[in-house]
Image: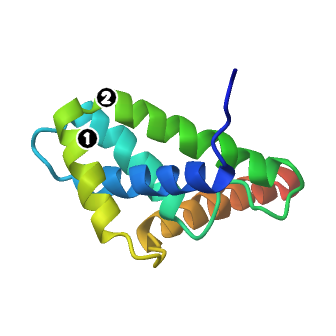
Amino acid sequence: MITIKPLKEEMQRLKTDTYALFLSYKDPRVPWYAKIIIAATVGYALSPIDLIPDFIPVLGQLDDLIIVPAGISLALKLMPKDVLDEYRKKAQSELNGSGQKNWVAAFIIVLIWLLAVYLFLRFVFRI
């Protein structure tokens, strides 16, 4: 029989894993290629601005449901098991319910959107 974890437990695990990745980023035991995935995933997950805004029906939520878990899953697979276990424990003990925001990642996403708007306007109006 297949049992499905309650959504609340799964979301808590996702939050803990995201924070564990954030904490592990500067650890020298984490390979450089894992750090690239960690930086991209955690930056996107903690950014207050999405690549596809949430007000766009379906697509706005779909990017959060696919990009973040896929990035976390890949980063977790690339990390050494002992390092991952250490930072998961640390993340569980440090999490106190306060949401962190990554304003650098938000700034980068805003720049991407501004560049897209500029290119669109340049194409449409031949500026």
Q: Choose top left, top right, bottom left or bottom right for residue 82.
A: top left
Give the side of residue 104 with respect to residue 120, left or right: left
Quadrant position of the C terminus in the picture: bottom right
In what element is the residue under mark 2? helix
Of mark 1 and mark 2, the one earlier in the sequence is 2
Disc 1 target residue: 84
Q: Is residue 36 above or below residue 112?
A: above
Q: Is residue 31 visible?
A: no
Give the side of residue 27 with respect to residue 114, left or right: left
The residue shown at (38%, 36%) is 75
Mark 2 nearby-residue class (10 Å; few <14, some 14–19, many ≥20)? some
The residue shown at (75%, 61%) is 53
Between residue 35 and residue 106, name the one nearer to us.
35
Which residue type does callout 2 highlight?
Answer: Leu
The residue shown at (31%, 28%) is 78
Between residue 51 and residue 30, name the one nearer to us.
30
Q: Is residue 23 above or below residue 32?
A: below
Question: Residue 78, which numbered label?
Answer: 2
